[in-house]
């Protein structure tokens, strides 16, 4: 299914089984008293209806960050030095394509940090390129779980005019349901607990290494939705004014 929503052209592959709608989001000027998600230039927001998952932390149908957003680079960079630094970092990442960028630049600026990154892959779309990966954002040692896990694509058009940010929830059958529910399926990996555990930090670091390896060795099509399916969608994008 082909769509052109306000200059954002895309092809929705049959494997995604969703529809999309687009809106123009009005600019919110920078205010030093505002939180990092509370300022942005006018941007184009694409929401997904009938997405294969619902109830995740990032809602692809209408939440501030979930879905697909196209930001004008110059206007966003002028608002705040943190944003300008991320844009420069993305330009560096795309030029050098390190195997594991640390961290991967993401917009909008979230009030949390990247917990891990897995399934890292560089993708080209019709008039730009970027990096896709699986991650979670949190302010603590979050276990890898289906409520918080998301597919992120962060990239820029070749002319440098637009930043493309896709934040779409993804599930894996072997993950715990949420950070509050520690139960894991038989083939899952149990996260360490902090109670009476003086080596909790080291235990969590080892847990992330094990989980990243498991995520990296899971076939693209075994996730819901499949990473290969989401890649097809991203690769179809063409951004115009």
Image (tube, grey):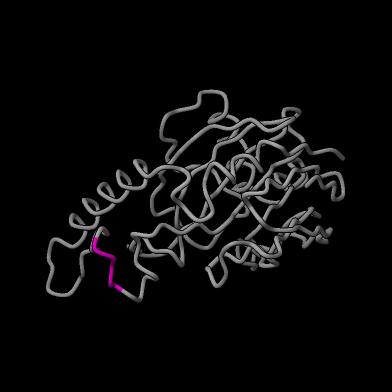
Nearer the observer, 24 or 178: 178
User: Quarter-wise, where is residue 225 in the image?
Assistant: bottom right
- Judge whether 205 appears above or below 85 on screen: below
Nearer the observer, 158 or 222: 222
Magenta residues (range): 182-186
Task: Tell how many labels.
Answer: 0
The C terminus: image quadrant: top right
Residue 145 is situated, as x and y percent measured from the top left of the image, at 39, 63
At a point 80% along the width and 42% down the height, the residue shown is 9
Whether residue 5 appears in magenta in the rendering, the answer is no
Give the side of residue 10 with respect to residue 133, left or right: right
Nearer the observer, 105 or 192: 192
User: Quarter-wise, where is residue 198 in the image?
Assistant: bottom left
Give the side of residue 46 with respect to residue 90, left or right: right
At a point 42% along the width and 40% down the height, the residue shown is 102
At a point 55% along the width and 36% down the height, the residue shown is 89
At a point 40% along the width and 44% down the height, the residue shown is 118
Give the side of residue 101 with respect to residue 74, left or right: left
Residue 214 is situated, as x and y percent measured from the top left of the image, at 31, 47
Residue 92 is situated, as x and y percent measured from the top left of the image, at 55, 29
Furthest toward the front, the residue is: 14
Kindly report the secondary structure that dominates the magenta region of the rendered protein. loop
User: Quarter-wise, where is residue 54 in the image?
Assistant: bottom right
Residue 235 is situated, as x and y percent measured from the top left of the image, at 66, 36
């Amino acid at each position: 299914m082909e769509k052109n929503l306000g200059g954002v052209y895309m092809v929705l592959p049959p494997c995604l089984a969703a529809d999309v709608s687009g809106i123009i989001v009005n600019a919110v000027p920078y205010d030093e008293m505002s939180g990092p998600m509370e300022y942005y230039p006018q941007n184009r927001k694409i929401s997904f209806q009938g997405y294969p998952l619902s109830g995740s932390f990032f809602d692809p149908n209408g939440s501030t960050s979930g879905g697909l957003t196209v930001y004008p680079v110059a206007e966003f960079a002028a608002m705040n030095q943190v944003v300008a630094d991320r844009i420069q970092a993305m330009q560096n990442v795309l030029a050098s394509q390190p195997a594991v960028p640390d961290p991967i630049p993401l917009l909008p600026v979230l009030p949390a940090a990247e917990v891990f990154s897995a399934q890292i892959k560089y993708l080209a779309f019709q008039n730009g390129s970027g990096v896709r990966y699986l991650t979670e954002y949190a302010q603590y040692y979050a276990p890898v779980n289906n409520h918080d896990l998301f597919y992120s694509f962060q990239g820029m058009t070749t002319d440098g005019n637009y930043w493309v940010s896709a934040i779409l929830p993804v599930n894996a059958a072997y993950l715990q349901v949420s950070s509050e529910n520690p139960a894991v399926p038989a083939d899952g990996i149990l996260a360490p607990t902090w109670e009476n555990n003086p080596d909790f930090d080291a235990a969590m670091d080892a847990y992330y290494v094990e989980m990243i390896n498991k995520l990296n060795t899971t076939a693209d099509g075994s996730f819901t939705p499949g990473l290969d399916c989401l890649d097809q969608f991203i690769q179809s994008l063409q951004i115009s004014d």
